[in-house]
Structures are given as structure tokens and as C-alpha cells.
Amino acid sequence: MCRASDAPTPHRAVLVMNPRSGGGKVEKFRLRERAELLGAQVLQVGPGDDPAALARGAAADGADVLGAAGGDGTVSSVAAVAAETGLPLVVLPAGTRNHFARDLGLDTRDPSSALQALRDGEKILVDLGFVGDRAFVNTVSFGAYADALLSPGYREAKARALASAAGPYLAGRQWVDARVDTPGGTIERPEIVLISNNPYHLTTPRYLGRRFALDAGVLGGIAVRHVDGPVPPPPPARLRPGWSESAAPPDDGLVVWSAPRITLDGAPADLAAGVDGEAVRVHLPVTCEIRPEALSVVLPRDRPGTPPEPQLLRLPAQRPRLGAVSGPVGR
């Protein structure tokens, strides 16, 4: 994991807090009151407010540390401003899943513990992903999850919306109308594309979907292509110079790779995408890239930390076909 150095005590820390995230964790853990007792200024995200705009205003007013309390969407918005302005970021895991905070080694059960970074903190540098000019701390996804985010009532019934959106993809009746280049060739019209800020661990069930490094300088790529359903045959794959037909994507439907940049291209003008849990539309072609050590994060010294990555398991010679997968690959 990232090398840490002592962080100076901030003179003017400004924390952007989303009271609706995580079922009301900001209020439950009295984050505003505790932050103010430590001398921080709190800006609360109200209906219609843009967390990035609040953070940008705080930076312009002289903040020397920015903080975010909320889900990964709120954290991602404030992180983008922190990277843009060169200010360090404090992360309070006050969302539902808190993937970024977990992979930073923070205590996701008690978001108030992260406030100690304001008094006794260590600074690390981590990578930041970008889809076009939009930053992401975790993932950008295309396919079923992105469609679910755009569906009415997603926030009130996430599981139902995701199940409804995933059905046509798993049945092979719907796909991402784009192509994505991988080291093994071009995949046409995949069902799901998931691009992450540093690769996710995929081989050990206990740590499935966890990142053990946020400073490796590469994106993680996962693409799923249905192989059992009635998807029309794709056009011939476009292979880059030096690639051979034998390097084309395997016929089991799952491709996993890492790269500093990943490009999606296709005929439609734009695609639905989920960027750290927020629904957006991106124009094609679009390139996702990693910006190494673009973000400075201040962490409390006393924190759970990141466990050592387990030794990779030997994958079976024959992986299950996509038809046996019970759900989409996603966050």
C-alpha cells in the first residue's frame, strides 16, 4: 500500500457532508458536531447542491484541507476538487458501502474515527481514475448497472432496479453498444464493462472485489460478453498490429486485464455510465485513464489498515461459462 508521511495539522479544514448518505450516518454519528469541536468548518449538502461546487468554493476561500462525509459519489466529487486544487483530502466513510474508504484502510463501521486525521494524520498519495475529464475513485461501469442508475426510483429500491436492468443483459437481449480494446483484442458489444481505479482482487472469495493497492498506476478492466444467448454474431474483431487471432478474447465470456488507459468506441453518440454510483452519459469515443498519485489523502494514524494481499490462487483450467453466472459483474 502507499507510503505514508506525517501530515501537518490543518489551519482551516472544510468538510462537505451529505446528510442523506448511508441512511443518515452524518446525524447518527454526530459527524458535524464532532468535526466542529476539532475546529473544522462543515458545509452540508442540501437538495440540489453540488458537492464539487461546495468544495471548490471552500478552496477559493482559503481551505488548506478538504473533507468529504458521504457515499462514494460525494467523496468522488470532493476528491476531484482536491486533486484539481492540490489540497489534501480527508475521507469520512458515511455512505452505504464505502469502497474507497475501506480500500484506504479506514474503519468503515465508525466514520467518526476518521476525524482524528485532522489532529494526528498521515498523508499518502493515491491514483485517481478519469473517464474523459470526470474523476472517479472507484469505478466507471457500462451496461446493466449504469441502466439501473438511470431508472426511476433506483435510490429507493436498488436491488429491484438492478435485477430489472440486468435481466435483458443476462439473457443476451441487450448489450453495451460499443467496442472496447483489450490486450487480447477488441470485444464488440459486451454485456458489461467495469473499469476501476486500480485492479480489484478477484481470486480469493473473502477479499473478492477489494483493492490492496491504490497506487499501482493502472486501471483494472473487466468485460463480460454473453456466449450462450441469441446475441447476433459481432463483426470481425479489429486487432492491433502485432496481435493475432489466437489472442482474441476467450469464448467463456469473461476478460480481465489492466492498463493505464482503456478506450470505448462505437456508433452511438453517447452511452449511459455509472461513475462511482452516479448516473451520467459519456460521449464516444471515450478514454478512461489513470493519473498516478494525483490525490493526496490524510488518514488517521490509528486505523484498521489494509490486510496483506493473499497469495493468488491457481485458476481452474476450465472457467465456468457466463451462462452459469447468477448476476452481473459490478459494484
Image (cartoon, rainbow, N blue to C red):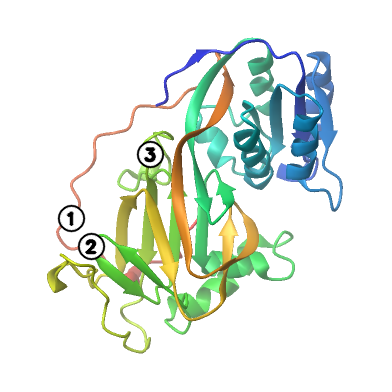
Residue 29 visible (yes or no) = no
Q: 148 above or below 109?
A: below
Quickly name the residue at label 1: 316
Query: Amino acid under label 1?
Result: Pro
Quickly name the residue at label 3: 217
- Which of the two residues, 74 or 227, is positioned nearer the viewer here? 74
- Are discs 1 and 2 less than 8 Å apart at CB? yes
What residue is at 47 percent from the left and 17 percent from the top?
4
Query: Amino acid under label 3?
Result: Gly
Q: Which label lies toward us, 1 or 3?
A: 3
Is residue 11 toward the left or the right of residue 329 in the image? right
Q: 215 above or below 259?
A: above
Give the percent coordinates (x, y) of residue 124.
50, 23
- Looking at the rendering, which quadrant does residue 8 occupy? top right
Give the percent coordinates (x, y) of residue 133.
57, 53
Distance between the alpha carbons at the discs numbered 3 and 2: 28 Å
Query: Which of the labelled discs sits on residue 319, or is there none?
Result: 2
Distance between the alpha carbons at the discs numbered 1 and 2: 6 Å
Q: Secondary structure at mark 3?
A: loop
Is residue 68 toward the left or the right of residue 218 in the image? right
